[in-house]
Amino acid sequence: EVQLVESGGGLVKPGGSLRLSCAASGFTFSSYSMNWVRQAPGKGLEWVSSISSSSSYIYYADSVKGRFTISRDNAKNSLYLQMNSLRAEDTAVYYCARDYENLDVWGQGTTVTVSS
Amino acid sequence: DIQMTQSPSSLSASVGDRVTITCRASQGIRNDLGWYQQKPGKAPKRLIYAASSLQSGVPSRFSGSGSGTEFTLTISSLQPEDFATYYCLQHNSYLTFGGGTKVEIK
């Protein structure tokens, strides 16, 4: 079964850091680009970042550029999102998603709350 | 950046109704568009990819059409389990979601 499982969310103070992880199983992880998408409470979906299969191409939304870093470890079938200088507006559920003809498989999400 | 304008933002409909949701791209995106259904507390689920291809396992009452800048998701006969929020997503240049359409019970 194709599966993505996020972890690492939690409560963090403004200006703090957090690292999210996404564990992939059931498919050849190293063959797919991957993405992070977030959803603030009561709001719509927002793309955050993308990384190609070999990490050659990396893209970020303007809202997180310079603060977030996406990475992956194909040997561990894992995707990461390092989030620094967190702000209240980064509070959201963060999803990882596989990129195949758009985003075909999603994880269940992990919640990040930025609050003092 | 490509903007996606989705309409309506919400609608009320009855079981059995035909429902149409539209997304308009700020520039041509060929058929690089998907449609997603999201229920409260759950991850989005893909319904349509490449503008009109039905995702495996998705009921045939869902259909997508369009190319270039105008796209439509149609539910031919609304079922109780279809009450949810729907999003379009373009992947022609980076990724951009539409604002969402909440489909509520009339």
Image (spheres, coloured by chain):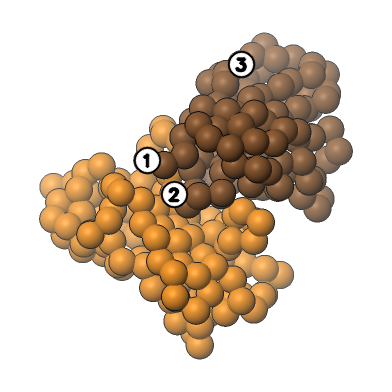
Chain colours: A orange, B brown
Q: Is residue B93 left or right of residue A31?
A: left
Q: Residue at label 1?
A: A40
How many marks the image carries: the answer is 3
What residue is drawn where x is 83% and y is 23%? B77
Q: Amino acid at mark 3?
A: Leu
Q: Of helix, strand and loop, which one carries label 2?
A: strand
Residues tagged 1 and 3 counted as in contact (Cβ below 8 A): no
Q: Of helix, strand and loop, which one carries label 1?
A: loop
Image quadrant assignment for residue B16: top right
Q: Is residue A66 left or right of residue A81?
A: left
Q: Earlier in the sequence, mark 2 or mark 1?
A: 1
Q: Chain of mark 3?
A: B
What residue is drawn where x is 64% and y is 46%? B32
Residue A40 higher or lower than B5, as above or below = below
Q: Residues within 10 Å of mark 1 (few under 14, many from 20)?
A: some
Image quadrant assignment for residue B61: top right
